[in-house]
């Protein structure tokens, strides 16, 4: 056992003196200046018997101190580093006065160890202890976080790296972990109440007469948005008005810096641990070689930028020269940015680019034909019924304000606002698995799943039902091969996460379709995934926008029979 509770710089009780006193106890990978990951560095836990302590802490960023929930006093939590093929026992001591939990995001564990209260275990009661125990079946970049209430927003998340049992398929000289997240000094429940009171409460850059020329929305589309009382700037529920965007727990002004030697192949293990923020990631001056996603290697693809949804991970290789570079994690609505630096020497900084113009939604984000692509006002008349109940086979109540009339496959698109940035942005169609998919059977069943909501009332659901309404689980026979078609009937991107399994994105790469545990479903689009129900048990399936999940966009997936049970 190599774990020990330490006081991080974030575990402040006082002011500047406490900052200085704790500076030497930072995890190496998250220090203001980091040389990179080391398996035995302080703040990294490993071995077969690990202990983590969940407790209330204080967190300081931008000169202000707020309440946080941390593990071992750190934000982000300790790096858990394991090895493929080992067994591990992780004991969690809950020092909170409320329940907590840890979900091992992307790990293939027995369902009782998955850590979702009410689905796979009862949770870790206040002032009690729970021990997770499971074999480590895979390798790659993962992370872990609370699945209890809104604790994830308060800092309850950390990175996890699993080293390959054999030679690592990815060649690199140095590695850095890059944890992206969002922080607010508003209490999460207060923030949620604000969203329920007014869905666009944090949208401070709405389209007005004064700024309508600042976006590409055509007059035709603007009239249609107005007629349908839709807001084309409603892209993020929570914006830079409430959030400070963090890189490895550091705000933009703190400028976390990762060191390298010129010419090295530097592996960046990027994790989006944000509660509610999708980021556009780029490093001006550097090509990004995408070599893995969600822990699984892909055929290398070179890009200049990528959009990373909540809970996704990407492993990138960069080969920097002897100069500094700025790592830019821009929020999808461009209301704020997380900033860090890659440099050969401490103290160096590169130019920080200005925020780009905020994007706006278009007709295709409503699941309708794009007017601008068909001659604008001269386009043929279309069916603009935005709530045609005949298109779905579930009950359409007040929680469903829209049913996309003509959803399309947008996996070949880079994401909102990135169509015309002038450089290569990764799309899901660029991704191909490095090795052949293990299950190449065609699906025997196809299921449509609608991602639904009422944006004005901040109501979110799947197939029109919230988890709190106790809907029927999605049921699968063990080892059944199924195609799921996730149809986004809303105007927001939803990063959808399936627990306990990997699925293949159906993107035209045959038996090399990329394996993922989380996929962004763009507004007004659908994503098809092929899925083998090979993990018996009950599993969560949900949007990884924390407040969407909290509001109800979550369902249970049931796979039977269990081990030892009759088929």
Image (cartoon, rainbow, N blue to C red):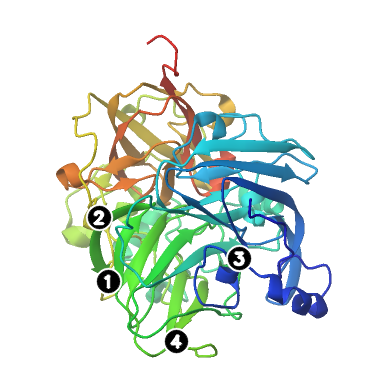
In three-dimensional space, the C-alpha distance between marks 1 and 2, rounded to whole angstroms, equals 21 Å
Dot 2: what SS?
loop
Dot 4: what SS?
loop
Judge depth for marks 2 and 3 and give the one in front.
2
Q: Is residue 522 above or below residue 205?
A: above
Which of the numbered marks, if any, corresponds to residue 431? Answer: 2
Dividing the picture into quadrants, the one containing residue 421 is bottom left
Q: Is residue 447 above or below residue 489?
A: above
In terms of depth relative to the viewer, which is nearer, 166 or 171?
166
Dot 3: what SS?
loop
Dot 1: what SS?
loop
Judge depth for marks 1 and 4 and give the one in front.
4
Q: Determine crowd level at label 4: few under 14, some 14-19, many 20+ residues with C-alpha closer than 10 A.
A: many
Q: Determine crowd level at label 2: few under 14, some 14-19, many 20+ residues with C-alpha closer than 10 A.
A: many
Residue 358 location (% of width, % of height): 43, 71
In terms of depth relative to the viewer, which is nearer, 455 or 340?
340
Q: Is residue 246 left or right of residue 56?
A: left
Q: Earlier in the sequence, mark 1 or mark 2?
A: 1
Are circles 4 and 3 on residues that touch, CB within 8 Å? Answer: no
Residue receiving disc 3: 243
Q: Earlier in the sequence, mark 1 or mark 4?
A: 4
Q: Earlier in the sequence, mark 2 or mark 3?
A: 3
Residue at horizontal 57 percent and vertical 45 percent from the top = 48
Residue at horizontal 60 percent and vertical 74 percent from the top = 31
In terms of depth relative to the viewer, which is nearer, 446 or 93?
93
Residue at horizontal 26 percent and vertical 51 percent from the top = 410
Which of the numbered marks, if any, corresponds to residue 219? Answer: none
Q: Is residue 94 left or right of residue 456?
A: right
Residue 362 location (% of width, % of height): 33, 58
Quarter holding the C terminus is top left
Are circles 3 and 1 on residues that touch, CB within 8 Å? Answer: no
């Amino acid at each position: 056992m190599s774990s020990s509770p330490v006081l991080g710089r974030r575990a402040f009780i006082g002011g500047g003196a406490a900052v200085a006193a704790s500076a030497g106890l930072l995890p190496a990978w998250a220090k203001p200046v980091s040389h990179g990951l080391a398996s035995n560095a302080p703040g990294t836990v490993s071995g077969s018997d690990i202990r983590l302590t969940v407790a209330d802490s204080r967190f300081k960023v931008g000169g202000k101190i707020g309440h946080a929930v941390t593990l071992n006093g750190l934000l982000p939590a300790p790096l858990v580093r394991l090895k493929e093929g080992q067994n591990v026992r992780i004991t969690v001591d809950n020092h909170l006065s409320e329940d907590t939990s840890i979900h091992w995001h992307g790990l293939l564990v027995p369902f009782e160890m998955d850590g979702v209260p009410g689905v796979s275990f009862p949770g870790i009661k206040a002032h009690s202890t729970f021990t997770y125990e499971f074999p480590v079946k895979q390798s790659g970049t993962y992370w872990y976080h609370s699945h209890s209430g809104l604790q994830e927003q308060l800092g309850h998340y950390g990175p996890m790296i699993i080293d390959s049992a054999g030679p690592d398929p990815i060649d690199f000289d140095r590695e850095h972990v890059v944890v992206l997240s969002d922080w607010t000094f508003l209490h999460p429940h207060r923030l949620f109440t604000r969203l329920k009171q007014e869905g666009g409460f944090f949208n401070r850059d709405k389209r007005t007469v004064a700024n309508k020329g600042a976006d590409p929305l055509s007059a035709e589309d603007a009239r249609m948005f107005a007629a349908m009382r839709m807001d084309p700037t409603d892209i993020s529920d929570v914006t830079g008005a409430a959030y400070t965007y963090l890189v490895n727990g550091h705000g933009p002004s703190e400028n976390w810096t990762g060191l390298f030697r010129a010419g090295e192949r530097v592996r960046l293990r990027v994790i989006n641990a944000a509660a509610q923020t999708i980021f556009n990631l780029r490093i001006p001056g550097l090509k990004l070689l995408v070599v893995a996603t969600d822990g699984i290697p892909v055929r290398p693809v070179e890009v200049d930028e990528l959009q990373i949804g909540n809970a996704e991970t990407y492993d990138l290789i960069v080969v920097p020269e002897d100069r500094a570079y700025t790592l830019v994690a821009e929020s999808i609505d461009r209301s704020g940015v997380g900033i860090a630096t890659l440099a050969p020497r401490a103290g160096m900084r590169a130019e920080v680019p200005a925020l780009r113009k905020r994007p706006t939604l278009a007709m295709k984000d409503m699941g309708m034909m794009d007017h601008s692509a068909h001659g604008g006002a001269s386009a043929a008349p279309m069916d603009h019924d935005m709530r045609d109940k005949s298109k779905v086979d579930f009950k359409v109540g007040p929680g469903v304000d829209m049913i996309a009339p003509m959803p399309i496959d947008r996996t070949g698109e880079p994401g909102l606002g990135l169509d015309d940035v002038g450089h290569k942005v990764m799309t899901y169609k660029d991704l191909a698995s490095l090795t052949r998919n293990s299950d190449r059977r065609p699906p025997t069943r196809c299921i449509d799943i609608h991602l639904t909501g009422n944006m004005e009332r901040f109501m979110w659901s799947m197939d029109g039902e919230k988890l709190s309404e106790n809907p029927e689980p999605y049921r699968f026979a063990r080892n059944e091969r199924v195609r799921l078609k996730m149809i986004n009937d809303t105007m927001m991107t939803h990063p959808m996460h399936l627990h306990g399994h990997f699925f293949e994105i159906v993107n035209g790469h045959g038996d090399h379709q990329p394996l993922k545990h989380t996929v962004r479903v763009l507004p007004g689009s659908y994503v098809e995934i092929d899925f083998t129900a090979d993990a018996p048990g009950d599993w969560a399936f949900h949007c990884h926008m924390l407040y969407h999940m909290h509001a109800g966009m979550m369902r249970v997936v049931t796979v039977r029979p269990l081990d030892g049970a009759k088929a």
